[in-house]
Amino acid sequence: MANNIKGFSESAKGFTKSPLGIIALFIVLVYGFASLVVSLGKNLDNNVAPLIYFLVIFPVIVFFGFLWLVVKHSKKLYGPSDFKDEDNFVKMQMVAAKSLVAATAKQPNSTINSELSQKQIEKIFELVSRTSKREQINSLENKILWVDDNPDNNIYERKAFESQGIEFDIALTTDGAMTLLKTFKYAAIISDMGRKEGAQEGYVLLEKVRKMGLNIPFFIYAGSNLPEHKIMAKERDAQGTTNRADELYKMVMDAITD
């Protein structure tokens, strides 16, 4: 008996190292106490019905509660001890950083072999390290809508976000984007500016999104990074505009994470 109690206490310590373990421990304890009541309780004949209802309904409540946690707070279900080492975390950071460096390298104004470029690469690694430590995406969804008629131009940028657990839906046109927005929820929208539909189609989409009553963070990823264009984007109720991959990554992650 003493060995059983000792074994259970050791197992309980392991459970308490993460939120998911605490939930499991709570369920075990509840059923343990219920079993004791059934086994050792006296004069239960007149009160057995409530106990039976509890034993039947409790798993259903736990199931839907767990489902809610997985959907809304999946990243909070795990504690540091759930990661046996930091290899996966480091790999995740490296993928994001390398993807942003590659995205920066392909941009026309990039100066890869200069001293400034080296400093920029160091800043990118610092940025990824800082954002990777955040725990929770604010939105109920971890998906971003990216609107661009040439999505292959943004493969590295998307890969950087995907390394952080973010998914994407791609729309090639404003109409395509609006169709998706009527069906799905998104943490943010990233749009280019000029498309075949028009030279300022990014603003056309932004206006339609706001007219729908959607306050989704909206970012423009286009060829310009001029101060006047940043001011214009803010005036039209966009959260930001840039032509730099690292700046886009920072703005979006700031908007959708704690």
Image (cartoon, grey):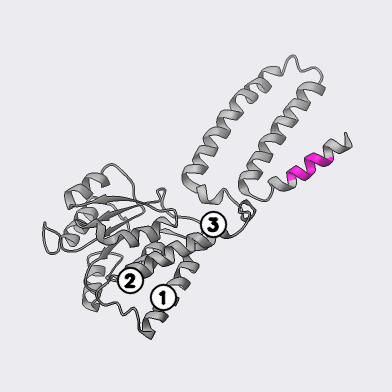
Q: Residues within 10 Å of mark 1 (few under 14, many from 20)?
A: many
Name the spot of residue 204 as percent of width and height, x first: 16, 58
Along the line of sight, the residue nearer the viewer: 140 or 199? 199
Quarter of the figure with residue 114: bottom left
Name the spot of residue 147 as percent of width and height, x first: 24, 55
Q: Amino acid at mark 1?
A: Ile
Q: Amino acid at mark 3?
A: Asn
Task: Check if residue 114 falls in the magenta segment.
Answer: no
| Start-end of magenta stretch | 6-12
Residue underneath mark 3: 88
Q: Determine which of the numbered discs, if any, sits on residue 104 in the image.
A: 2
Name the spot of residue 254 as percent of width and height, x first: 41, 64
Asked if residue 6 is positioned above or below residue 120 in the image, the reply reads: above
Q: Secondary structure at mark 3?
A: helix
2 and 1 marks in contact (CB < 8 Å): yes
Give the Cα separation between the discs numbered 2 and 1. 9 Å
Asked if residue 105 is positioned above or below residue 135 in the image, the reply reads: below
Residue at 75% of width from left, 31% of height from top?
33
Q: Earlier in the sequence, mark 2 or mark 1?
A: 2
Residue at 29% of width from left, 63% of height from top?
219
Quarter of the figure with residue 5: top right
Quarter of the figure with residue 98: bottom left
Q: Determine which of the numbered discs, if any, sits on residue 121 in the image.
A: 1
Along the line of sight, the residue nearer the viewer: 73 or 155? 155
Q: Amino acid at mark 2?
A: Thr
Q: Secondary structure at mark 1?
A: helix
Per the picture, the main secondary structure of the magenta-coloured stretch is helix
Q: Residues within 10 Å of mark 2 (few under 14, many from 20)?
A: many
Q: Earlier in the sequence, mark 3 or mark 2?
A: 3
